[in-house]
Amino acid sequence: MGLAERLSDVDARIADAVRASRRAPEEVTRIVVTKFHPASIVTDLHALGVRDVGENRQQELRAKRESLAPLEGLRWHYIGQAQTNKARHIRQDADAVHSVDRVRIADALERAGDGAPVLDVLLQVNLTDDEQRGGVSPADVEQLATHVAGECPTLRLRGVMAVAPLDESPASAFARLADCAATVRGIVPGATWISAGMTGDFAEAIAAGATHLRIGSAITGPRPMRG
Ligand SMILES: *Cc1c(COP(=O)(O)O)cnc(C)c1O
């Protein structure tokens, strides 16, 4: 299968899952994760109608965004770990940052604003027991959401993001994420985004209320190795 076939195959599976969950198709945005692939794949995806793309490294996001500036209507989602010393670049290059997981990164993104347009942000939640993993623990979601809503006027809190743990069924993990999403909506009612679902679990994520799917290899094919 080529890129166009894989994209339409995934989109058909998304449509099936949306129907099975009795949800409306407009509620679900499919982000194509293009990390490690050359910028040319984004050009190809754009020609196929893709507008939302995801990257997880700041330098790669910057390079692709610069080389693809003439492509119209692309929205770049930053889904990787956010480092405070990269906040300025991330702020310049991303249309949405899915990986705000601590006060320090929220504050760094806020300070990097400097007259830039308001930045959409999501709180990344750690659904594992491993505290080393990226993401705020579910117990601390409320506090972080309160901070972003109260102290970061140039960040627009849109919702939550998570990666399902490997050692648990995606459905139960995504149910915990849905609880965190409700907590955030209790603070910012408009924060309705739930970024969840990858190649292996997007149907479960849709069933659990995901609004933004981050799908890589099912559409792009295997990622080139990183040396
Ligand atoms: C790479 C990545 C994805 C996409 O993964 P696939 O399994 O290839 O669909 C989604 N989310 C995050 C945070 C990623 O880093």
Image (cartoon, grey):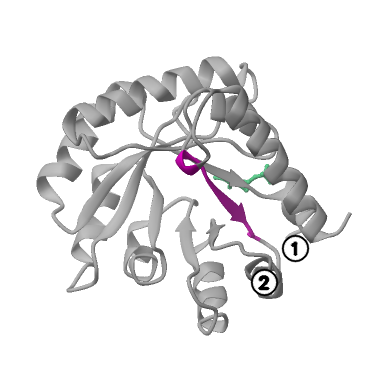
Can residue 129 be seen here? The reply is no
Residue highlighted by disc 2: 47
Q: Tell me the kind of residue under disc 2.
A: Ala
Residue at 63%, 29% (x, y): give it: 17
**SS category of the residue bearing label 2:** helix
Residue highlighted by disc 1: 227
Can residue 175 be seen here? The reply is yes
Count residues near mark 1 (Cα–Cα under 10 Å), then give few for <14, some for 14-19, many for 20+. few
Residue 35: which quarter of the image? bottom right
User: What stretch of residues is rendered in magenta?
Assistant: 26-35
Residue at 33%, 37% (x, y): give it: 192
x, y percent for residue 26: 48, 43
Residue at 62%, 16% (x, y): give it: 169
Q: Tell which of 9 and 215 is nearer to you.
A: 9
Ligand 1 quadrant in view: top right
Q: Could you say which disc has been placed on residue 132 in the image?
A: none
Q: Is residue 113 left or right of residue 37?
A: left
Are the two marked residues, 2 and 1, in contact with CB atoms closer than 8 angstroms? no
